[in-house]
Image (tube, rainbow, N blue to C red):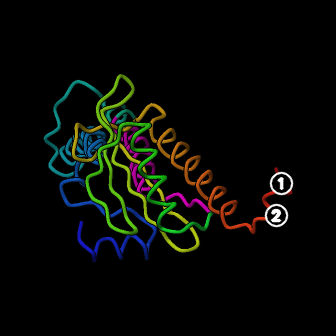
Amino acid sequence: MTQQQIQRMKDTETLVLTKGQTFWHYSVVPFLLIMPIMTTVDVFKYYVTHTYSAARPIGEIISTGYIWLLPAIAFFIIQRRRLKFRTINISVDKDAFKDAVEQTAKELEWTIEKATSDTVVAKSGFSWRSWGEQITIVWRSDKILFNSICDPDNRPSVASWGMNKVNRKTFEQFVRQNAANMRFAAMPADETQHQQ
């Protein structure tokens, strides 16, 4: 991931994928469009070239063929929304951010693929629940941007069976815990004694 792609992700708050990753991320959509395309060919043969000779009436073919447009559109919208970052509204320093990433990576057995001072790309491996996820986390001074999607470099999958949510919730738990510890450590000594 280049610095330009990272900056674009920060500006748009949307995950940037390579062309190959984009193809696999949206691969269910062209699959669902096979029936409407075949239906369009039959409609063309019936109305334009008058060479349609199948046994099924054209009305039945239209009603059963174009219905596949609905799930194709739905999956396109779902997959597009999955590229949006979730915002964790918390202000932490880069050390607390890095610690939360390391704690979550250890807990959930992530492999860190790329790490800079403010951006992390990690992968989770294959498990009985999923084919793996790609986790992208971006630190900003006033918030953290988090995205977890089915790994676009792996076998195509449209369901993570809850692992994307587990990734986000676990990271958020650690980052909030680190923020609380950071605030507690920054308190003057007399205030910390009163709280104990």
The residue positioned farthest toward the right in the image shown: 194
* Residue denoted by label 2: 191
The residue drawn where x is 40% and y is 68% is 118
Is 43 or 16 nearer to us in this picture? 16
For numbered disc 2, what is the local secondary structure? helix
Residue 112: image location, x then y, percent: 30, 50
Crowding at mark 1 (Cα within 10 Å: few <14, some 14-19, many 20+) = few
Identified by mark 1, the residue type is: Gln
Crowding at mark 2 (Cα within 10 Å: few <14, some 14-19, many 20+) = few
The residue drawn where x is 49% and y is 60% is 97
Residue 29 against residue 138 in the figure, above or below: above
The residue drawn where x is 35% and y is 76% is 7
Asked whether the residues under the numbered discs 2 and 1 touch, taking CB atoms below 8 Å apart as contact, a structural biologist would say: yes
The answer to if 7 sits in the magenta stretch is no
The residue drawn where x is 38% and y is 50% is 135
The answer to if 75 sits in the magenta stretch is yes
Q: Is residue 102 left or right of residue 46?
A: right
Is 98 or 9 nearer to us in this picture? 98
Magenta span: chief secondary structure:
helix
Residue 189: quarter of image: bottom right
Residue 150: image location, x then y, percent: 35, 42
* Residue denoted by label 1: 195
The quadrant of the picture occupied by the N terminus is bottom left
Q: Which residues, given as a range, are shown in magenta? A: 65-89
Residue 96 against residue 129 in the figure, above or below: below
